[in-house]
Amino acid sequence: MESLHNELKVLIIEALNLEDITPADIEAQAPLFGDGLGLDSIDALELGLAIKKQYNIAIDADDTNTRQYFASVANLADFIAANRA
């Protein structure tokens, strides 16, 4: 699971052009939005598209759990792992 965490950290940095951040700067359990990494709703859309492209997994914006999936790198990794076939 740690390798998936690292893949996601790199994907976040590349998809969102976060130039001053390294994968080591992102904690797996830290919030991605608000006080954590400070992402916003536009970042969520871009990240969702990057996840769909990279893992062929669509995250439904209308799903009541979407906010939870995007809560942290660890949550995203759990969601991706559970939905990979």
Image: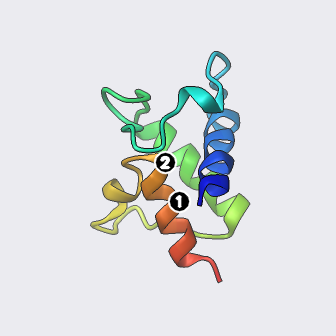
- Quadrant of the rendered structure where residue 84 is? bottom right
Kindly identify the residue that appears in the image at 48 percent across and 67 percent down.
Answer: 79
Q: Which mark is residue 85?
A: none
Q: Is residue 41 above or below residue 18?
A: below
- Identified by mark 1, the residue type is Ala
From the viewer's side, name the closer residue of 67 and 85: 85
Residue reaching furthest front?
A: 2
Amino acid residing under circle 2: Val
From what the image shows, is residue 73 above or below residue 4? Answer: above
- Residue behind mark 2: 73
Horizontal and vertical percent for residue 15? 67, 39
Q: Position of residue 2 (x, y in %)?
A: 61, 53
Q: How many marks?
A: 2
**Number of residues whose C-alpha sits closer than 10 Å to that of mark 1, classed few (under 14), some (14–19) or many (20 or more):** many
x 36%, y 60%: residue: 66
Q: Quadrant of the N terminus?
A: bottom right
Residue at the extreme bottom:
85
Looking at the picture, how far across and down is residue 23, in whole percent?
63, 33
Provide residue 78's location: percent of width, then percent of height.
Answer: 48, 65
User: In terms of secondary structure, where does tag 2 sit?
Assistant: helix
Colour theme: rainbow
Q: Is there a contact, CB below 8 Å, between mark 2 and mark 1? A: yes
- Residue position for label 1: 77
Q: Is residue 34 left or right of residue 83?
A: left
Mark 2 vs mark 1, CA separation in Å = 6 Å
Q: Residue furthest top?
A: 20
The residue drawn where x is 34% and y is 66% is: 62
